[in-house]
Image: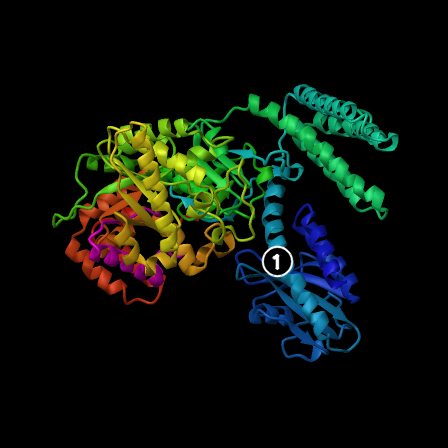
Amino acid sequence: MMLEMLRKIVQEVNAAEGLNDALEIIVKRVRDAMGTEVCSVYMREPGSERFVFTATEGLNEALVGEAVLDPGEGLVGLVAEREEPVNLDSAATHPRFQRVPGLGEERYQSFLGAPIIHQREVLGVLVVQQEERRRFDESEEAFLVTMSAQLAGVIAHAKVTGAVEEELDSGVATPAKITGIAGAPGIAIGTAVVVSPVADLYAVPRRTVKNRRAEVRAFKAALESVRTDIRTVAENLSDQLNAEDHALFDVYLGILDDSRIGAEVAGLIKGGQWAQGALSQVMIEHIRHFERMEHSYLKERAVDVKDLGTRVLAYLQEADKEQRSYPDRTILVGEDLTATSLGEIPRENLVGIISVRGSGNSHIAILARAMGVPTVMGAVDLPYTRLQDRELIVDGYYGVVLLNPRKDVKKRYQKLLVQDEALSKDLESLLDLPSETRDGHRLPLLVNTGLMADVARSLEQGAEGVGLYRTEVPFLLRERFPSEEEQRQIYRTQLEAFAPNPVTMRTLDIGGDKALPYFPIEEDNPFLGWRGIRVTLDHPEIFLAQIRAMLKANEGLENLQIMLPMISNIAELDEALDLIHRSHREILQEGVVCELPPIGVMVEVPAAVYQAHALARRVDFLSVGSNDLTQYLLAVDRNNARVADLYHSFHPAVLRALLTVAEASRSEGKPVSICGELAGDPLAAVLLLAMGFDVLSMNVTSLLKVKKAVRSLSLEGARKVLDEVMIMDEAGQVHARLEQVLREHGLEQFIHSRVG
């Protein structure tokens, strides 16, 4: 009963238009659910510790927005200070009780307050009160605590959304700042283009249009297309359904009648909304209307209405895609962006990316870094459906999105943008210089690739080869598995472009956050599930075709290296090696002339760290994938924005694991590289150099920055720094020491300070 009550309240609050509406729903529903006489919410004032009386059921509503408690004042201040519930049977006798004139709470004896906390920040306090002098029982206290915890995220989102929507509706340019996670470094100032998920009525961006007639025509065309589909299905099933079931198709056609829902949508379009937004608004209203009905038959009609609306929306989206144009400085905004959505925008137009979901180490962020596009991930509070055509600033260094920034803030970001461009030009002087330390130690710098666009940029930036070619990217960009010959051609292009330098191709690495649309993998815990080598060993036909394509592509070039991902035990490695040797024998019999290339293992899981010696003895090289290794060592899902701040590349456990792998590989006489994001961090270059990594592989945008760092250091000095940090207990200490090292070597340009 209580759980159902919680669910209904949260659902209703989620559907609220803004913060004020959400708070009004909360105080009314919580008071009714708990049977109390008063329920109020006090919200913390932005930029201060004061609490404002924001919503109430039972106290003086005339003081909403007017009554304020100073920091630490009253029982509300006590709840916020303690960050836990306060339950009193006689509030007025408590030493912290603060009477607010005119509020009308003097006669209420019982007081129960619970803090509303979101991401460790106290947003407000939820309070219930009663005249009867009694202490609220454990179940009531638990309910209020549960409610405040459930609503914290909703309130945080409504707070930002409300501020942004108020500005959009009133035309008053109120600055808004949304904090996410740094995805790809850099600054972008541009115009938002919102990409909504395919046919999702609840994720349609709001947009106004000038050519209303064209929108009405597009809507009517989509409507007629759906009508035609329904009639066709009805005809095809006419012999298989009885008259009663067949009559449902007439009901569907009736719902789409121009005089009913169609007329409502057309009316909104004529008022200035674009067709998709008008359709979304009308259909959601009707869906909610049916969902609220008690009769089960009528309630089920909500599913029909949603299905019909989704079908119409799909046709509208298809028509819109054909006509879509992109501003010169496009900032792509979406809830859950994909590689395909990136590929639809001309590269010269794309200057920034914002994704509501994901983290700085999710696949889309990695692609963004490869493309050199400033990106913010995990911007969960972003009201993205309202941002179409708005000017935005993307701070990819600190994971911040700014809407309507103050003039001085915008000016500082423009200055940073100019500085970044100047730094890029300055680094060009290093293009033809070797990557070696001041005391002559060579540290080759390779690139991570996956897109064809990476090739030209990598060569221009002086890459010495490819340390990681993500073979899953061509698979992700198709609607089916590429054939062996298609793969051979793709791999040949990569190998030829970088010959005679090495190209390390990782075998298909899907699962986790990389799902193929035509080969979906649905699991409760995908990062600990069926991914990487586990998938391809279970499907040897996929693995064998890929290996054969790689070996054939290597004919006459001999610069291929093959790398196996997600190896967690020796048996997996032995099985994979057997299949590689089998493929090699087969192509030799077919007349292809090529040597068996070097084969390596990607060290990405803790088990591989502790078996590094055994792995190194069986292969030609080891390569650390620091992104996955870090997430597995720290038990932090790198796609989860809630725990992204716990993902520390310089965590002492991560550093010890890296050193263990480097030492094991060296003792077995095998080279070791690192191809995670850590390899492209100038701060990390100090440690990786000292640990003995033979090769660093990174995104092309980091290449010259890391080269600059390497050329400014000495191997001897780096080893002294490594000795210092390996006895440190916290990632923050390590990070601070490495920043100090960069400053000492004149590399402060790689340390970015926060603007606003």
**429 or 411, which lies in front?**
429
Mark 1 Cα shell of 10 Å, populated few (<14), some (14-19), many (≥20):
many
Question: Where 100 falls versus 16 (above or below)?
Answer: below
Q: What's under tag 1, amino acid-wise?
A: Ala
Looking at the image, residue 640 lies above or below residue 141: above
The x, y position of residue 234, in whole percent, is 78, 25
Q: Which residues are magenta?
A: 647-676
- Picture coordinates of residue 409 (x, y %)? 43, 44
> Is residue 408 in view?
no
Q: Secondary structure at mark 1?
A: helix
Camera-side residue of 730 and 413:
730
Does 194 sit left or right of 359 as displayed? right
Give the farthest residue toward the left: 439
Q: Where residue 333 sits: x, y (%)?
A: 52, 37
- Residue 649 or 505: which is nearer the viewer? 505
**Residue position for label 1:** 152
**Residue at the (31%, 43%) spot, across then down:** 698
